[in-house]
Amino acid sequence: MSVDGSLIEKESPPQYVTQRGVVSSTEIQELRAEFRAIVTSMEKWFTRQDEKISKVIDDFNDMKASIKFISDGYEDIKTKTEAVSQRCNAEVGNLPEKRGENLVAFLENIADLVKMSISQQDIVAIHRVRQANSGSSHPKNVVVKFSSRILRDSFLAAVRIRKGITTEQLGISGWPGRRRSSIAFGSSGLSMIPYSPGSMRSQRCSPCAPRRIWGSSQCRISDAPLRA
């Protein structure tokens, strides 16, 4: 079958063939303008994000400063509270230790001897404290936290008026090696200076440092230095 060549020459090519690769300058300009608009929009968006991040960082630094201020204030209040709380403490020495002992009952017995009324509500806490010398056979001292400083001072004053309390008067035996022991009392929080007639003249303290001097029946608080 033959093809008529004249028909092929007269037939025009489809429109898409001649215009497929042609882009007008107007369209290029429109694409460029659209691209620039997108870039500008992105730059503004990033600028806003930078401002937000900077504000968050500033707020975070302000919060850190506030937390530090509150923390410092809390530590200051805590220190002052502990100092005030220690003023409610009394310390009892030479009280023999027993397994399962009732320290509250011991304190109530002492209060009865000095003609002072003390209830369990007046005692915030009571416990023995660890000794500096772990090998010592001396009984651990007892620290009593009273509900108020006035109550603590009244208790110590009543003990001083009594001028001596022994384990025998409390109905208990003395600590190991002794038939009876004299109970020592004092305010808690100062370093303890053991008492002995010979050593009292040989020990010296800082002229400005308060000290606790333990005697056979009570303790005395003094701000004066020991002298030879």
Image (tube, rainbow, N blue to C red):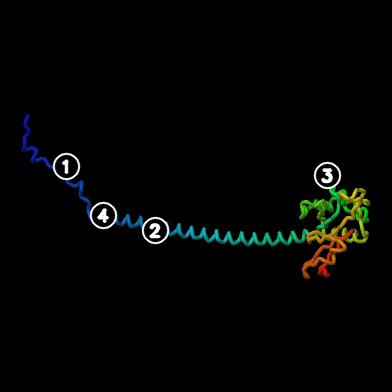
Is tag 1's residue or tag 2's residue first in the polypeptide sequence? 1
Mark 2: which amino acid? Glu
**Would you say 132 lies left or right of 113 here?**
left
Is tag 3's residue or tag 4's residue first in the polypeptide sequence? 4
Q: Are marks 1 and 4 in contact (CB under 8 Å)?
A: no
Mark 4: which amino acid? Ile
Residue pictured at 82% horizontal, 66% vertical: 202
Mark 1: which amino acid? Pro
Q: Is residue 125 visible?
A: no
Residue pictured at 86% horizontal, 63% vertical: 198
Q: Secondary structure at mark 2?
A: helix
Residue 99: mark: 3
Is tag 1's residue or tag 3's residue first in the polypeptide sequence? 1
Mark whose residue sits in front, 1 or 3: 3
On the image, which quarter does residue 220 sit in? bottom right
Mark whose residue sits in front, 1 or 2: 2
Task: Report which residue position mark 4 lands on.
Answer: 28
Mark whose residue sits in front, 2 or 3: 3
Q: Are marks 1 and 3 in contact (CB under 8 Å)?
A: no
Alpha carbon separation for disc pair 2 and 3: 79 Å
On the image, which quarter does residue 59 sit in? bottom right
Image quarter where the C terminus lies is bottom right
Q: Are marks 1 and 2 in contact (CB under 8 Å)?
A: no
Q: Secondary structure at mark 1?
A: loop
Is tag 1's residue or tag 4's residue first in the polypeptide sequence? 1
Alpha carbon separation for disc pair 3 and 4: 99 Å
Count neighbours of disc 3 (C-alpha within 10 A) and say few if under 14, some if 14 to 19, many if 20 or more: few
Q: Are marks 2 and 3 in contact (CB under 8 Å)?
A: no
Alpha carbon separation for disc pair 1 and 2: 45 Å
Image quarter where the N terminus lies is top left
Residue 43: mark: 2
